[in-house]
Amino acid sequence: MKHAAALLSLATSVPPHLLHQEQVLAAARNILSHRYPEFDTLSSIFANTGVINRYGVKPIEWYFEQRGWPERTVAFLEGAEALFIDVARKAIERAALTASDIDTVVTVCSTGIATPSLEARVAGKIGFRSDVSRVPVFGLGCAGGVTGLSIASRLARARPGTNVLLVAIELCTLAVRHDELTKANIVAASLFGDGAAAVVLRAGDGGATRITGTGEHLWPDTLDVMGWKIDPEGFGVIFQRTIPDFVRTNMNPAISGILALMDLSIGNIDRFICHPGGTKVVLALETALVLNQGALDHERSVLADFGNMSAPTVLFVLERARARGLPPRSLLTSLGPGFTASCVALQHAA
């Protein structure tokens, strides 16, 4: 592909507070069990998500208290700005660039509201030029890492030779709710963590790993599968359907259709790099993509070490896959609100 965008660098970052799954379960039991009789039955979810540790922008004690929009927003802005600066600097340095070399910044985030957006808030501290192009993207949820990479790659292709920085950052733990006595809230408490990932892309001058195709599939009448509801307390998680069952039934034809537009098939892909929504979702993906059970090993290890961080999680998986050595052809996939499947095809030259 002429002027395909190449990955110059990839970096990840997590906030400083390590949250062990046992700690989170104990806290959830203390806060919810006396008001929610079903909690003891649902608490087994904590052992079944595949999560061992995750990270939060606040120490665990902060989450013991009920928080409203003002407190959540202050915590979001402080935590997100710090993570943005850290992960962006690492990615820019690994690309052998300086912040003033960045021409476009794509910021993907769905777990907080910031106006001005995050890249504007940190521009002076990082050293972006005054004429840097800013592309903040909200609402992609767990699909944001892959869709954000797709957007960034198209922007790089549109202006060959320019440097595009993608930052995917989510602070999912700040959405923890004391008032939502639902299974969906228990699942969220058992699963979500905070993190950020950044990628620097450039088109027109080669690169070992190139983006050769992108695509999305939006299923009709699926707005209730996943998302946020917004009320006076903050974000409230929406999980209205059994996502693993949906994946097993619908993922293969959607991915096959996207690949067909690239003149590829599932059999042409050497490695799938997937967003690990949870253990059951990973198993469902292996079934849907006709993979051996256990094939999505990096997905499981990232989920265990960091939890589901929404948008950046798949880029953590890509980081581990790159460290092990990418095969000639990989496909990044993620699922998110819409309900949407998003894909990015990578071609790697050893």
Image (cartoon, rainbow, N blue to C red):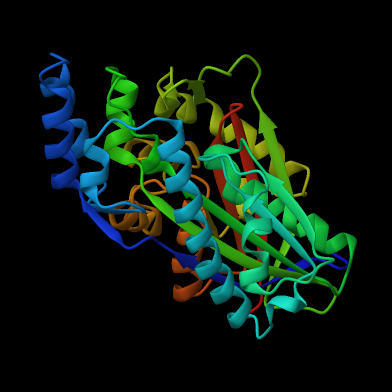
Nearer-the-camera pick, 184 or 129:
129
Up-down relation of residue 320 to residue 94 (above or below) = above
Q: Is residue 76 visible?
A: yes
Q: Position of residue 55 (x, y in %)?
A: 32, 55
Q: Position of residue 12 (x, y in %)?
A: 48, 66
Up-down relation of residue 94 to residue 194 (above or below) = below
Residue drawn 67% across and 65% down? 123
Quadrant the N terminus occupies: bottom right
Residue drawn 36% across and 53% down? 57
Quadrant the C terminus occupies: bottom right
Residue drawn 60% across and 59% down? 167
Up-down relation of residue 45 to residue 230 (above or below) = below
Nearer-the-camera pick, 236 or 128:
128
Quadrant housing residue 256: top right
Q: Position of residue 151 (x, y in %)?
A: 74, 51
Q: Residue furthest bottom?
A: 96
Q: In this rendering, would 131 be left or right of 208? A: right
Up-down relation of residue 59 to residue 156 (above or below) = above
Q: Is residue 282 visible?
A: no
Q: Position of residue 51 (x, y in %)?
A: 26, 47
Total count of labels: 0
Residue drawn 53% across and 47% down? 311
